[in-house]
Image: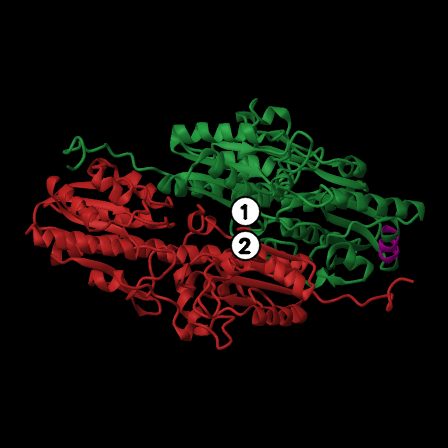
Chain colours: A green, B red
Amino acid sequence: MGISGKVLIAQSGGPTAVINQTLAGIVLEAKKYTQVTRVYGALRGVEGIVNENFLDLTQETSHNLEQVALTPSSALLSTRIKPDSKYCHDIFRILEAHDIRYFFYIGGNDSADTAHIVNEEAMLANYDLRVIHVPKTIDNDLMLNDHTPGFGSAARFVTQAFMGINLDVRALNGVYIGVVMGRHAGFLTASAAIARKHEADGPHLIYLPEKVFSMQQFLLNVKEVYDQHGICIIAVSEGIRDATGVPIVTMLNKSNEEDAHGNVLLSGTRSLGDLLADQIREKLNIPRVRSDTFGYLQRSFFGCVSDIDQHEAREAGERAVQMAMWNDVDGSVTIKRTGNYSVDYHLERFEDIAAQTRVMPDEFINQAGNNVTDTFKFYVRPLLGSGLPQPSWVRAPQVPRIFNNGLK
Amino acid sequence: MGISGKVLIAQSGGPTAVINQTLAGIVLEAKKYTQVTRVYGALRGVEGIVNENFLDLTQETSHNLEQVALTPSSALLSTRIKPDSKYCHDIFRILEAHDIRYFFYIGGNDSADTAHIVNEEAMLANYDLRVIHVPKTIDNDLMLNDHTPGFGSAARFVTQAFMGINLDVRALNGVYIGVVMGRHAGFLTASAAIARKHEADGPHLIYLPEKVFSMQQFLLNVKEVYDQHGICIIAVSEGIRDATGVPIVTMLNKSNEEDAHGNVLLSGTRSLGDLLADQIREKLNIPRVRSDTFGYLQRSFFGCVSDIDQHEAREAGERAVQMAMWNDVDGSVTIKRTGNYSVDYHLERFEDIAAQTRVMPDEFINQAGNNVTDTFKFYVRPLLGSGLPQPSWVRAPQVPRIFNNGLK
């Protein structure tokens, strides 16, 4: 069994729908161990640690924690600060002063890096400290994880959004572009593919940051789909880039004008969706073209959650405490897929998580680079959870016309 | 009992989450009457009528209709066409040719107008035709209705969106602007108010098209809230206008440049949210300002629906058929509130629905014009339905600091 002392929990980075499941998993499990004298929560991630902004979660009811677990977005608030080594040293000094012996940090790869440095400080100082990083990110871009807590619920939102959009555009025709988050990783955008039920359903085209985006090819694709179906629904990742690595949104925001020094002027900061819609209107002469940027709703909408994602986020927190208490180890909790569908939790070295970001493997993307494969759909479907809504069409037979050539 | 003949149903305008409940209500009720020889559905509203694009819904299973009822967006597809009197005359000729004796048109006030003209054509021709308009619009802007089917579910989406946004912004600080649909009526934007649980929760400010928008006052309001809470969450209607009636989005998109003829140049077509965010950044010097336009998701997202809205949309369709069959009348179905909370359905004259659009009454808006009253909240809450999610905060006590003046 581990050393006697306090537990500290902090949350970092962009919120998810299930990040508080992990929080509840850690608190409720930690309170079971006699060597745990208190369970603290730092307010606003590492900022809360260096400022000693701690809540005593030992004095929180389990009933309220269960309600908090169902609430999206970091209940302990968050921060975007990426601590340097001085900052990490300060974190360590505070932990030491408060006799904190177990530090659980819920976040993405920057958080894994912070956990790593704090862990090394403790070892140098011969201070007995267990440090566990617990993953969360809607981007699904952490190395060595089959997927990350938070991703499944955001993917479900994107899927349900495109299911509705498909029906909306079908009713009124035209082209629609939905811009989805994910930075350099296309997983979230790719999840839109699950919205397709009938052959004619959208999204018909999916553009990911993993593949070079060609405007010419894009317009050809859109024209082809529109000519075939009378509609074209497109899922685009915010991070799509051209062959030289320049984001498409940056490229399109440049006007053709140059200033006195020959620099291309930026004509504004219009959204990627609007800019692509303009291209379609101008070059393809399609009248009804609409676009949305899914924005903050896709990560924070309250009431669209995957039960699988909830369950795993909770378990990841619970397992993190068990690993620290029973196995006396440090590292980053990872999710491994062990069946269709089952998972298990491992512990990896911080540096293997912190170093890189994961992107979509080639087998998940079609040859043309404008859609996903069935392999990806098979991978992602269980993560969205149970009870996904199913669109149904009217299938009644057509009535014969009386006026064969229209009204005279 | 009414005359023997066919029933025709069509759907029009922007889709809603429950418009197919009304469709199912009409079809399933109509099939109970022996004088109904067939139940037809026109594809794409009035376009489907003049083109004789009819489906025979008599040959659709009730089980599939129940699935269709749960699917958002017009299952019979839709149209934006506003028929002139020639078009209405063509509609009438097609109805006559197909021996259609009952015409149910699901839509907003333009649809009530079309129904009216078709009804008058039939009377002039001495053709026995019952015409009933059944309301639907997320804008909630139909006269003589307490509210309209489709509004409750869209309002629920807006509420759940702002609940999540509030938690997201609370976690990371800053100012957030969410732009909501509704054209000239502020009901949908105003519904964001239900997202507030704790005193400090957003949305803190709500701007509606019913009140003149002053940029100066807006910036003062934002500064005040931000200084008090460290965050400021704002719900803005897409239709906000200045004192001269010019939409704010148009005003802000004008640059200060003039062309050779002295006309002000339009500098672009940026979104209202982005333009307001710029004003806050520039004038108030607040670093983190974000905005989203809720776009098509608020009317078509699949999986956010009010059970009250579903129930009423269904009943409105069922009652429409009963009125036509038993009472031999024409007109527009309206929803009246008869208790807290109960409703009943009346029939009003087409022209009283078609003529005007309803906007928020003064008693729903606060004196300062930047929020709603409790009267509005009491009005709107039941429409969102049961099982609305509830955000919960951690309430644990603060831990005393060890380093009173921070780390040295």
Does the magenta run of residues contain A95? yes
Name the residue tied to disc 2: B260
Give the residue at x 28% y 66%.
B144
Q: Amino acid at mark 2?
A: Ala
Q: Residue furthest front?
A: B260
Q: Quick check: A407 left or right of A272?
A: left
Name the residue tied to disc 1: A294
**Residue B251 seen in this snapshot:** yes
* Residue A95: image location, x then y, percent: 84, 55
Please identify, in this view, whether the residue under mark 2 or under mark 1 is nearer the observer.
Answer: 2
Q: Residue furthest left?
A: B126
Does the magenta run of residues contain B209? no
Across the whole image, how many numbered discs are drawn on residues?
Answer: 2
* Magenta highlight range: A88-96
**Marks 2, 1 in one chain:** no
Q: Splitting the image into 4 quarters, where does residue B96 fall?
A: top left
Q: Splitting the image into 4 quarters, where does residue A392 fall?
A: top left
Q: Residue furthest bottom?
A: B367
Q: Chain of mark 1?
A: A
- Tell me the distance, in whole angstroms, between the alpha carbons under discs 2 and 1: 40 Å
* Residue A301: image location, x then y, percent: 54, 52
- A239 over A7 or under it: above or below: above
**In the picture, which quadrant includes the C terminus of chain B?**
bottom right
* Residue B195: image location, x then y, percent: 52, 62
* Residue A174: image location, x then y, percent: 41, 39
**Residue B389 seen in this snapshot:** no
Foreground residue among A380 and A346: A380
> Which mark, residue B197?
none
